[in-house]
Amino acid sequence: MKPVFKLAEIDDADRLTAISISAFHTDFEVAGRSAPGGPPGYDSSEFHKRMINEASKFFKVVLDNESIGAFWFFRNDLEKAYLYRLFISPEYHREGIGGQIFNFLFTRFSEIQIWTLKVPKWNTRTPKFYQKAGFRINGQDEHFFFFEK
């Protein structure tokens, strides 16, 4: 399974929003949360359109000519970036696509020396995923773990 990573366009926002909703709802299911939900804007096409325009880079994950996920980041400067969000359609979880995303990011943007991100503390699955990619917890507050690689 070899996805390709293409820059997202405004026309992709509705499809990516639908994928975001299904992906983040599975995080809630795994964590045993009583109601589905996700991070701010996860269920909004307008939010995704804004991010496509504002992010330093916003990629869609494409497999067999179909979008199956997305990820985007903001550069703090030439050598530091914040991975704002990453999601994959649930039917492709545990297929190695996340690792391929990180290989792409770390190779294509090799000048970025420090990557940061945050994960809500209630999310029991995602920290392991980021740790497997080489991220380490470097701080926390009441609601989040902060990661760096």
Image (cartoon, rainbow, N blue to C red):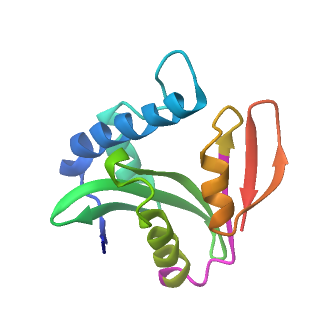
Estimate the x, y position of residue 146 in percent, counting from the top left: 75, 49
Relative to 6, is 51 above or below?
Answer: above
Image quadrant of residue 57? bottom left
Estimate the x, y position of residue 100 in percent, counting from the top left: 45, 72
Camera sees residue 39: no
Relative to 63, is 33 above or below?
Answer: above
Camera sees residue 142: yes
Estimate the x, y position of residue 120 in percent, counting from the top left: 66, 37
Estimate the x, y position of residue 68 in percent, counting from the top left: 28, 54
135 and 39: which is toward the camera:
135
Image quadrant of residue 5? bottom left
Q: What range of the chain is rendered magenta?
A: 108-118
Asked if residue 122 lies left or right of residue 139, the reply is: left
Asked if residue 94 lies left or right of residue 128, the reply is: left
Q: Residue placed at 69% from the left, 78% from the top?
A: 113
Residue 114 painted magenta:
yes
Q: Residue placed at 59% from the left, 31% from the top?
A: 31
Q: Residue placed at 30% from the left, 35% from the top?
A: 45
Q: Quadrant of the C terminus?
A: bottom right
